Amino acid sequence: MVIDFHCHVGTGEELQAPWTTRATLELYLERAEQAGIEMTVVFAITSNDYERANGEVAEIVANHPGRLIGFARVHAKRDAGKIEHMLRRAVEDYGFKGVKVHGAEAMPTRELCKVASEMRLPVLVDIVGRVEVLPLLATEFKDVPFVVAHLGSFSDDWRVMQFMPQLLSRYPNIYADTSGVRFFDYIREAVEQAGPKKLLFGSDGPLLHPGIELHKVKLLNLPPEDEALILGGNAHRLIFK
Ligand SMILES: [Zn+2]
């Protein structure tokens, strides 16, 4: 099964960029279907109010039964003190399966990781290049799977991507998604050094085309069983345990 581990849905408040305005699902779903993507992990765009935004994502997920997997989004600092409450609601009321944190807002805190550990939730984290934080997260919370979005840098920072294969190899609970990575050979190196169990296909839709992102994984020309892990097997293992 092909699972896209990284896609945004819903609306934001600030209207200053596409990712604070609206992520529309319809065009994504059309493209994903053409590409053969069967399930997609979805979560909010950047918002001033993740309780509202998570509720909106929950409605969208409920309208697409069996097709979408919801993740909660939290701002680890602004939402401090209520993260357990937010994630319990997300899991128990909305059926969400993980949590997304964006380092441009706040990196994962002890509070967030502790709740993720207790609730056995994978943490998808955009580290915005802050690769030095990963060993700290991975060793403080060995039972929490951290999936590093964009192989560590959406902004093409090769210095970060160069270190990712080592970190993926060294820490069993560090993974990475392939979304938005332009420097193809860093993906290839990550698979060669860390193995196919440590990478997850993600698109960062709807702004990025899921078919293009999926094709990047196919261009690795891996043995079918290895390709299947990256395209969905690893996501399935982390989400459904
Ligand atoms: Zn994203």
Image (cartoon, rainbow, N blue to C red):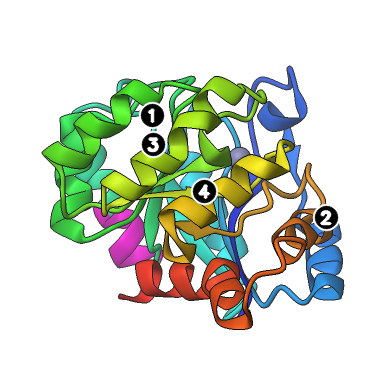
State the extent of the magenta-drawn residues as a range.
88-94
| Residue, disc 1 | 75
Mark 2 to mark 1: distance in Å?
30 Å
* Total number of numbered discs in the rendering: 4
Q: Label 2 is placed on what type of residue?
A: Ile
| Residue, disc 3 | 74
Question: Which one is nearer the viewer's eye here, 64 or 189?
Answer: 189
91 drawn magenta: yes
Mark 1 touching mark 4, by CB under 8 A? Answer: no
Respond yes or no on whether mark 4 lies under 8 Å from ligand 1.
no
Mark 1 touching mark 3, by CB under 8 A? Answer: yes
Which label's residue is closer to the chain start, 3 or 4?
Answer: 3
Please name the predominant secondary structure of the magenta segment in the image.
helix
| Residue, disc 2 | 212
Q: Label 1 is placed on what type of residue?
A: His
Mark 2 touching mark 3, by CB under 8 A? Answer: no
| Residue, disc 4 | 190
Mark 1 to mark 4: distance in Å?
29 Å
Give the number of the mark in front: 1 or 4: 4
